[in-house]
Image (cartoon, grey):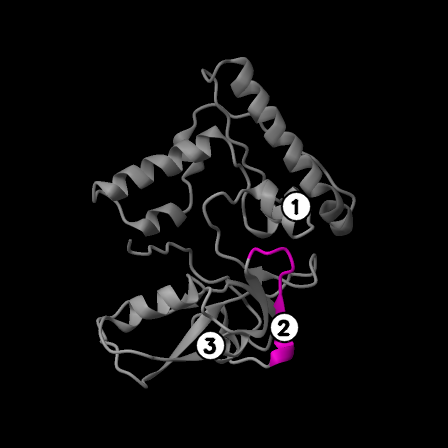
Amino acid sequence: MESLYSYSQPMNCTDTTRLCTSFLAFKMEPNQTLSVIQSMFDVLPGDVTTEGNGNGYVFIRKNCSCLTTPKNYVSNTTFTVKSNGGYVYDLVMDAYEGLAILDNTTRESRVGAVISLRLFCGCSSGLWNYLMSYVMRDGDSVQSLASRFGISMDSFEQVNGIQNPDNVTFQYGNKICEDVELNKAQWSSLFEPYLFFESYKNYLQVDIIAEDADDLRAWRGWVESRLRQLTLMIERDTFGKLQCHPYPQDM
């Protein structure tokens, strides 16, 4: 079966002098060794930690920086081609399981060729010590990943820009996936901004005022989680006839 990777653009940044420590979660293949992983990600043995629960993941520590053009967070590495045949892009996407950033070209693979590529990473805005790049797999959910990595669901949703995991969102995403299968849309459509104010006619505005920025950070996740609970209850009690879409914004 052909592997398919769909992802958004790298995280935006503003400070091109910014350099931070980030982590990448990589699922090892049965025949891979830690020395192979170190070579793939251009790291030392001390930069690789094995997850101790039998899931087969390793966590790789990498420096993450802000590019000048475009202003995105990335980390650099190189990959050495081990066999002939096929295209470099497909080879890299499979090898790095969606963690790599590489232009989709028709360059053919040649044994010994060294490919320069970039990896997804991110620097924290101050609310978290480190950020980690993780490619979601079948069976993953916000709840399971938050529990696995020891963070709250609100923090997980906030750092990943997930504001409204409700029925409306999933229905909209499902429609795009169906259009992609029919060649009526591109995978990139999944990551385009949702045209909120063009999709709804009735609005209820709730203003919540924080005393200061620290107070906002402390309570924002709690408030947004209660909005989502309200949305789910409205949809449940009206048997789906009335659907809501929270749109929390800072003022």
Residue 91 position, x and y percent, is 32, 69
Question: Could you tell me which secondary element the residue under label 1 belongs to?
Answer: helix
Left or right of 233, for residue 29 = left
The residue segment tinted magenta is: 45-55
Q: Can residue 208 be seen in this view?
A: yes
Residue designated by label 2 = 20
Residue located farthest toward the front when viewing the structure as drawn: 31
Could you tell me the amino acid type at mark 3?
Answer: Met
Answer whether labels 1 and 2 touch (C-beta < 8 Å): no
Secondary structure, mark 2, is strand
Label 3 environment density (alpha carbons within 10 Å; few <14, some 14–19, many ≥20): some
**Could you give the CA–CA distance between mark 3 and mark 1, rounded to whole angstroms?**
29 Å
For the point 68% across and 42% down, the residue is: 221
Asked which quadrant contains residue 206, the reply is top right
Real-space CA distance between mark 2 and mark 3, rounded to the nearest whole angstrom = 20 Å
Q: Earlier in the sequence, mark 2 or mark 3?
A: 2
Q: Mark 1 points at which residue?
A: 147
